[in-house]
Image (spheres, rainbow, N blue to C red):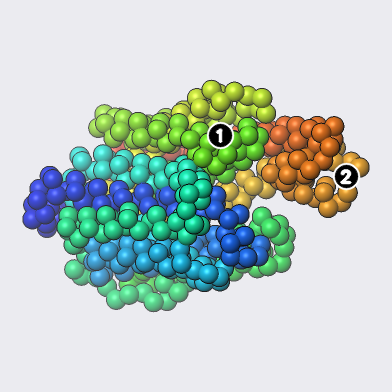
């Protein structure tokens, strides 16, 4: 942390001011984490209240994801130039106003537009929640701050179904968006009073061409990934979007390496600590997204819990992550980053393997134990990954640098869910097909499509037919989930080995890497 940042920290009230600023940033992360899962529970209600079609329901979810993923890098780079505090205020205000407006929409298309604006606000807030930390905290304090911010974001994930279930039971559907308003107001107040302004005083001209390549490439790639579950990997539209995204991002890379004033300095990847820390950060997102993707239907449909009960049963992984984050922040002073990363991924893989043993009749104890092990592992890998990323990025480029890693994590997580979804669907269908003989084609398609569809079909069939079908669907889903978890565990072990072998033990400044290059 340079002298300018120290002076700014003193002006905002010393230690108390810094932790006041952290509280505001934590609230920012909490509201974004909450918004990721709260809407999933509300989709059936939105369908009936707004008369939304299946395509419109998909776009209510996808519009947010596309805006968030596509605009992360330009938003982070603009924050470096215009001021990170100023842009964080803008992002929170936009997210909050769009949330309130979304709660008052009377049409599905109007809600989709508000979700786009919420995604734009989230794209500004998400990278800055980490990028501001080096301007406030010293290298010694930063791991603890990272633990709080990351923990708040992940805490919002299981809270989503809990909060949504309560709100939808007692209030109108718009309350799932309106709940963001008080949290945003508190975050805005904290940022206004406690977060110091920071920017790059010698920022080069904005790379407009690079920004266009970035937005178009990431948006196209993520769009293809979003459409894949509905149409398959071989669909022409999906393939066109994926290929266009890959080509545009290749063009982005070539342009960034040749232009004098790149949007984001891709030479950061010449620093092996940054590269492997980023790989770890992306893998953490892959693990969290994959686990939440498969365990939600397992807890809700296979084990028979409602939305609120499902949220409660996800708390062990969040609680373990918080404990692991605090522990990791302390252990980092004595244990090399590469060892922390490897140990974290091995712990996570152990939890994944344990969870793969869960079946239709498995008690919750095994599930809770597996979640706890995964939570400890994810936190043990995440905190040193983020700290290494922030220590490698020049302080005047923290917005763009963290946005780059957030974008990679976002794309990697989305791609991971798509791949794991394909594995799950294939395994589920292969296991349940033999139990669908004799059913009408429409009924068979519904049962084959998902375990929730099979549960709905079984509920409307005579008990003698419905009960065996539902049991077969439960077993088929548990088997498919096991396949997904074992593949994820193998990925974790591979990354652990690679990080242990190739990540440097000592920190190396980015400037030294660039001089060597």
Position above or below: 465 against 416: above
Q: Which residue is mark 1?
A: 489
Q: Is residue 276 visible?
A: no
Which dot marks residue 464?
A: none
Position above or below: 292 against 371: below
Q: CA distance from mark 1 to mark 2?
A: 37 Å
Position above or below: 424 against 90: above
> Which mark lies nearer to you, 1 or 2?
2
Could you tell me which residue is drawn at 17 percent across and 55 percent down? 194
Q: Residues within 10 Å of mark 2 (few under 14, many from 20)?
A: few
Disc 1, disc 2: CB below 8 Å?
A: no
Residue 86 is left or right of residue 477, and the answer is left
Count of numbered labels shown in the rendering: 2
Query: Circle 2 — which element?
Result: loop
Q: Position of residue 260 (x, y in %)?
A: 33, 73
Query: Circle 1 — which element?
Result: helix
Q: Quadrant of residue 236?
A: bottom right
Q: Nearer the viewer, residue 380 or 303?
A: 303
Report the residue that reaches farthest toward the front. Answer: 170
Could you tell me which residue is drawn at 63 percent across and 34 percent down? 304
Q: Nearer the viewer, residue 182 or 119?
A: 182
Q: Residues within 10 Å of mark 1 (few under 14, many from 20)?
A: many
Q: Position of residue 253 (x, y in %)?
A: 46, 65
Q: Quadrant of the C terminus?
A: bottom left
Could you tell me which residue is drawn at 75 percent across and 32 percent down? 471
Q: Position of residue 161 (x, y in %)?
A: 50, 45
Could you tell me which residue is drawn at 14 percent across and 55 percent down? 5
Q: Position of residue 502 (x, y in %)?
A: 42, 39
Q: Is residue 376 visible?
A: yes
Residue 343 is left or right of residue 133, and the answer is right
Q: Which residue is mark 2?
A: 439
Residue 59 is left or right of residue 343, and the answer is right
């Amino acid at each position: 942390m340079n002298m300018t940042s120290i002076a700014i920290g003193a002006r905002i009230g010393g230690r108390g001011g810094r932790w006041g600023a952290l509280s505001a940033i934590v609230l920012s992360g909490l509201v974004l984490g909450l918004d990721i899962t709260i809407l999933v529970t509300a989709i059936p209600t939105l369908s009936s209240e707004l008369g939304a079609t299946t395509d419109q329901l998909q776009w209510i979810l996808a519009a947010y994801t596309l805006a968030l993923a596509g605009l992360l890098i330009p938003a982070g780079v603009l924050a470096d130039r215009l001021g990170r505090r100023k842009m964080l205020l803008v992002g929170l205000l936009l997210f909050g106003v769009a949330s309130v407006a979304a709660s008052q929409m009377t049409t599905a298309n109007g809600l989709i537009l508000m979700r786009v604006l919420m995604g734009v606000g989230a794209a500004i807030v998400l990278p800055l929640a980490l990028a501001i930390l080096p301007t406030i905290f010293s290298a010694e304090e930063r791991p603890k701050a990272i633990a709080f911010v990351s923990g708040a974001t992940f805490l919002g994930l299981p809270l989503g179904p809990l909060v949504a279930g309560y709100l939808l039971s007692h209030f109108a559907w718009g309350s799932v968006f309106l709940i963001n308003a008080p949290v945003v107001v508190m975050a805005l107040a904290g940022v206004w009073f406690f977060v110091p302004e920071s920017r790059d005083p010698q920022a080069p001209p904005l790379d407009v061409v690079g920004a266009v390549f970035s937005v178009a490439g990431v948006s196209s790639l993520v769009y293809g990934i979003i459409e894949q579950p509905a149409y398959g990997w071989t669909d022409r539209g999906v393939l066109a979007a994926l290929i266009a995204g890959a080509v545009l991002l290749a063009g982005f890379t070539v342009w960034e390496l040749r232009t004098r004033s790149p949007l984001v300095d891709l030479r950061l990847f010449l620093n092996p600590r940054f590269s492997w820390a980023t790989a770890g950060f992306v893998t953490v997102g892959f693990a969290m997204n994959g686990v939440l993707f498969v365990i939600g239907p397992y807890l809700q449909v296979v084990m028979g819990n409602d939305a609120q009960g499902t949220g409660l049963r996800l708390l062990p992984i969040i609680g373990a992550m918080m404990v692991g984050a605090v522990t990791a922040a302390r252990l980092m002073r004595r244990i090399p980053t590469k060892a922390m990363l490897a140990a974290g991924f091995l712990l996570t893989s152990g939890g994944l393997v344990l969870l793969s043993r869960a079946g239709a009749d498995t008690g919750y104890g095994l599930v809770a134990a597996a979640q706890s092990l995964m939570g400890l592992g994810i936190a043990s890998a995440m905190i040193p990954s983020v700290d290494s990323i922030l220590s490698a990025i020049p302080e005047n480029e923290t917005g763009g640098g963290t946005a780059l890693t957030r974008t990679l994590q976002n794309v990697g997580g989305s791609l991971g869910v798509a791949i794991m979804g394909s594995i799950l669907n294939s395994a589920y269908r292969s296991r349940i097909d033999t139990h669908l003989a004799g059913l009408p084609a429409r009924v068979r398609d519904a049962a084959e499509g998902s375990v929730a569809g099979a549960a709905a079909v079984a509920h409307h069939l005579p008990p003698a037919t419905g009960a065996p079908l539902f049991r077969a669907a439960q077993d088929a889903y548990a088997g498919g989930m096991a396949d997904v978890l074992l593949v994820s565990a193998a990925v974790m072990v591979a990354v652990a080995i690679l990080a242990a072998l190739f990540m440097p033990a000592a920190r190396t400044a980015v400037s030294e890497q660039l001089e060597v290059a």
